[in-house]
Image (cartoon, rainbow, N blue to C red):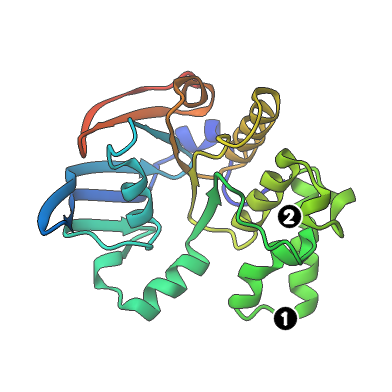
Amino acid sequence: MWHHRGSWERIQGECMSTAVQVTGLTRQYVMGGEPLEVLRGVDLSITYGEIVCVMGPSGSGKSTLLNIVGGLDRPTSGSVLVAGSDLAAMDDEQLAVYRRRQVGFVFQSFNLIGTMTARRNVELPLLFSGEPEEQRTARAAAALEAVGLGHRIDHRPTELSGGEQQRVAIARASVNEPAIMLADEPTGNLDTHTGQEILSLIKAMNAEGRTFLITTHDRAVAEAVAHRIVTIVDGAIARIEQGGTL
């Protein structure tokens, strides 16, 4: 069980606070000496307890948006507030602390360390946060138990299926109790059945209060889990609609 916040139903009845507030966000790069505008004035608000899916074709800017919210990239202009913290006001060291404590990352390719057991992989964010070893061990074990992998705790990634590896990645992303979970195409490397299992896990975590911002190119994925679906086209939000979970 994830004791982060209450259920989505309870949160709906409360005065909901904002997990993420993106305002006037732009991002430009220089490619071949020419400016390339990847994000163009994006405004987006995400409340605690929501699952928001961002859809769009390759190159639309959805991954750039995710990276900026995650503190992996900086905007050209505009502001990003996460859990009340202004990312623009942070220096590189403060952003590193932010990434360790406020956000959890789930990647399409799992990004597990092959020489480490599942438990050691999940312990990494706690190690970087300076958590004592005994507490790291207990919290990592609890996180793996929560994603249904208590029996695979000492297995390495090569001994796990793709779905199990993604569960380890989700446990690692959630172990620090982040304000928001960021998932970039979390079912992209999985077959349909396994992908559905991961989506069910995300919905179960959300029912316990986890907040998610997910990118996907698959509308069926978005409709399966999202409270709202945000479509980005050419760096700008084209529409925001209700997902299939409301």
Check disc 1: other Cα within 10 Å, few if <14, some if 14-19, many if 20+. few
Residue 230 quadrant = top left
Asked whether 80 or 19 is in front, the reply is 80
Query: Is 153 left or right of 167, judged from the image as shown?
Result: right
CA–CA distance between discs 2 and 1? 16 Å
Residue 185, image x, y percentages: 50, 38
> What's the residue at 80%, 76% (across, down)?
134
> What's the residue at 11%, 59% (across, down)?
33
**Secondary structure beneath disc 1?**
loop
Residue 46, image x, y percentages: 36, 42
Residue 19: which numbered mark, if any? none
Marker count (numbered) = 2
Residue 221, image x, y percentages: 51, 25
Q: Residue furthest right?
A: 151
Residue 73, image x, y percentages: 32, 61
Q: Residue furthest front?
A: 32
Check disc 2: other Cα within 10 Å, few if <14, some if 14-19, many if 20+. many
Asked whether 11 or 96 is in front, the reply is 96
Residue 127 quadrant = bottom right
Of labels 2 and 1, earlier in sequence is: 1
Q: Is residue 13 visible?
A: no
Q: Is residue 199 visible?
A: yes
Would you place residue 203 above or below residue 90 in this image?
above
Residue 132: which numbered mark, if any? 1
Q: Residue furthest left?
A: 34
Residue 143: which numbered mark, if any? 2
What amino acid does circle 1 point to? Pro
Asked whether 136 or 67 is in front, the reply is 67
Query: Is 198 left or right of 101, judged from the image as shown?
Result: right
> What's the residue at 72%, 81% (across, down)?
132
Query: Is 2 left or right of 58, judged from the image as shown?
Result: right
What amino acid does circle 2 point to? Ala
